[in-house]
Image (cartoon, rainbow, N blue to C red):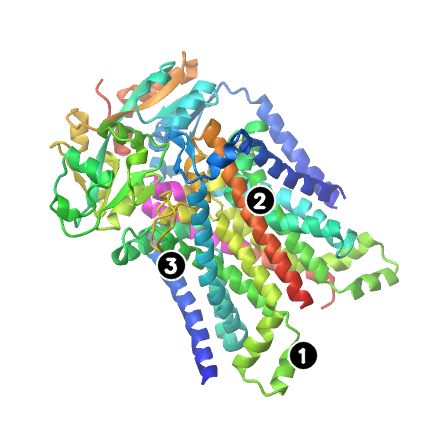
Amino acid sequence: MLLATTAALILLLVLAFLLLEAWPVLSGGGWGRFLSGEGWYPLEGRFGVLPMVWATLAVALGTIILAAPLGLAGAIFERFFAPAPIAKAYRMVLALLAGIPSVVYGLWGLTVLVPLIALWHPPGAGLFTAIVILTLMILPTVALTSASALQGVPASLLHGAAALGMNRKGVVIGVVVPAARSGIISGLLLAVARALGETMAVLMVAGNVVQYPTGLFDPVRVLTANIALEMGYATGDHRAGLFASGLMLTVMVLVLAWFSARLARDGRDG
Amino acid sequence: MKQSRLGKVVALIGLAMLSAVSEAGSDRLELTGSSTIAPLALVIGKRFEKQNPGVRVDVQTGGSSRGVADARSGLADIGMASRALKTVEQDLTPYTIALDGVSIIINRANPVTGLSDEQIKAVYTGRITNWKEVGGKDLPITVVNKAEGHSTLELFLHHFGLKNSAIKPQVIIGDNEQGIKTVAGNRGAIGYVSIGTAEYDAKQGAAIKLLPMAGVAASVRNVRNGSFPLSRPLNLVTKGRPSALAQRFIDFARSNAIDDLIQSQYFVPPQR
Amino acid sequence: MADRMFTVLIWAAALLVSAAFVWLLGDLVWRGVDRLSFSFLFSEPLNAGREGGIAPILISTLLILSVALATAIPLGLGAAVWLAEYTRRGGIFGQTVRLSLDVLAGVPSIVFGLFGYAFFCSYLNMGFSILSGGLTLGCMILPIFIRTIEVGLSAVSDDWRRGAQALGMTRAAALRHILIPSAAPALGAGLLLGIGRATAETAALIFTSGYVDRTPESLLDSGRALAVHIYELSMNVTGGDQAAYASALVLIVLIIAMNAGALAFTDRWLSRRITP
């Protein structure tokens, strides 16, 4: 089919172009310099990208840790605990949250959340704030995908559990969630991939200092924010460095996607 | 059904491209560069368009370095650079359209009333880390620095003789307002922004205050009379002789017909 | 006892999320609602956006979105159909393609921005334009779109396909009248995700469709999207805060309206073709 081929070509094109633009940094022994932790000072010709990689991973990890239970709890709430009108209201809340653009989350984060956290732990803009904002952003996705996964659990399983005399908690935790496991996880990983790729909101609240995240409240710069901050004026090697970091992000997503596919497959077979 | 829709899309793109080819381009000016100058260029451009129907002035951002690079490569008719040209950029011609000062700002609740140049350097390089060391409260200092690529950073570094790798910031910000919001939201923060911006926001109630530098109060007035030590020209740059249209625009932007616009963007009209 | 504890926890989680939402939206409304008015929606920005309205920006936003959807929908539908119907289930080829799509669906939007800037703006010489921005966004939402529809199509029971075959329908006819309409919810979900992501996109658009706040006269003109406008007003324009918040409210309403529209569209039009 012509359309499918075009689509595939476009996607290949994206990857090809990224590789092409990143080549100057990756070739010529650039890899070592790129990965070493010398610090990112492009104007002085230093392109150590590792602190930002760790920062990106730390932000993503923190977000999963917060968003998974909250999102799943929200889905369970909506499906099993909420009376019909409240469930509907809750769905609307989630849909509204999902509709707020990242720049707005960032603005609110900068003007409301950061000063608040600064009172507790200066400077306020840092890893923790970024995690909180990202959790809020991906929560609706996690909740909604988990909800549809829970929905997909055959009613027969629920009936069976009830017949066995299990209480609500037992049914939910012991039967429904495990049965919906693959759907929940794939939804979670989709949301995390989004968190990994989030730019504006993190740019406004994470502090943007290129350093290894040693403390929860340290200001950090993630790869996406770095690209956004510097893309406008980067030339030559610097620009190639940005493209290379973009590829790096893509690799991280690749790993995540592979992992998710493995888990989902095992979940289905298991 | 799907094929015809695809066909329509292709046709639409084709038409759009055709219209581009037929676009002569002689009635359009492209400006790129400093995000500080961009709002000013935008309003000047609008007034220019009104007085010269048929002309279009398109402004894009990307930073002063981008403006210089684009002017040099011809991607832009005019580059916008919020700094003086460097020695390696002498192949380009700058036209100063306004002046802007850069002031140190701290949170309004901070009792400190002034910092010497030495103290500012020490704070920014991490040698002084608590406000009590400079006469303030016992509060850790949150150093706010600008991201690389912004000429405000380069100006700051140059004035204080520092390298960016020597600075130990706690927060790095992109554009001016992000800096203001960061300092306003943090009692221990210190940063530097455009004076006009800071003056306006402080007057509107933002929780910041401007610190004098080397004893001179940070105000738009002092930038105008030249007494404030850290000020910079806002330049339009071109490579070689600008086109007739570009020259008209540049002359317009340097005339006093747009002084009110300069002031509306909280900059200072240059001495003429 | 454990059951009650569980219930409490679940309710607490739900309340926490709702509280955060109320706080966020309430703050936005409080700061921006004063600036909202009919003239805000229909007039041009003045004084670098501090005064006046956002009409040209709304137009640019809708144009960019249209270009993105015009590229993504036909290409996405075609590719999804091919994946779901014409490749062997569990075959290695289909699996590889699916995995690559999942990867690309997760590629950060700013990376697409880099690509769009390098390919559409520089290489194809489209410069800063609605077209560059729209095509970039189209590429961005394409993978999500394909995957969502493909999942929806695969979920349709094979009985239906066999039934259609038994009735002597051609594959194309079966697709058109039965399979695609029954995957309508997936189509809607895909549209929803795509539109939401595209309209909220900021960073990628700053470098592809640009900064100009005039009403674009052709697709090759630069045009500022609403999200970019909000960023500019709040981060770069002195005194632009109120307009930024008001624009934010407009953007949220826009996204929600489009989401509702996407849902209604798929619910009503496509599923009308099948008896419930």
Spatial CA span between label 3 and label 1: 41 Å
Q: Which residues are magenta?
A: C231-258
Q: Which mark is residue C211?
A: none
Subunit bearing disc 2 = C
Whether the residues at callouts 3 and 2 have beta carbons within 8 Å, the answer is no
Whether the residues at callouts 3 and 1 have beta carbons within 8 Å, the answer is no
Whether discs 3 and 2 lie on one chain: the answer is yes
Relative to B25, residue C15 above or below: below
Subunit bearing disc 1 = A
Identify the residue position indicated by label 1 in the image. A156
Subunit bearing disc 3 = C
Left or right position of C123 against B140: right
Left or right position of C269 against C172: left
Residue in the picture at 52% in, 72% down: A76
Q: Locate residue C172, reporting x and y percent.
A: 80, 52
Relative to B207, residue B116 above or below: above
Neighbor class of circle 2 (other Cα within 10 Å; few <14, some 14-19, many 20+) is many
Neighbor class of circle 1 (other Cα within 10 Å; few <14, some 14-19, many 20+) is few
Spatial CA span between label 3 and label 2: 28 Å
Tally the marks.
3
Identify the residue position indicated by label 3 in the image. C24
Amino acid type at circle 3 is: Leu
Secondary structure, mark 1, is helix
Identify the residue position indicated by label 2 in the image. C140
Left or right position of B224 against C104: left
Amino acid type at circle 2 is: Met
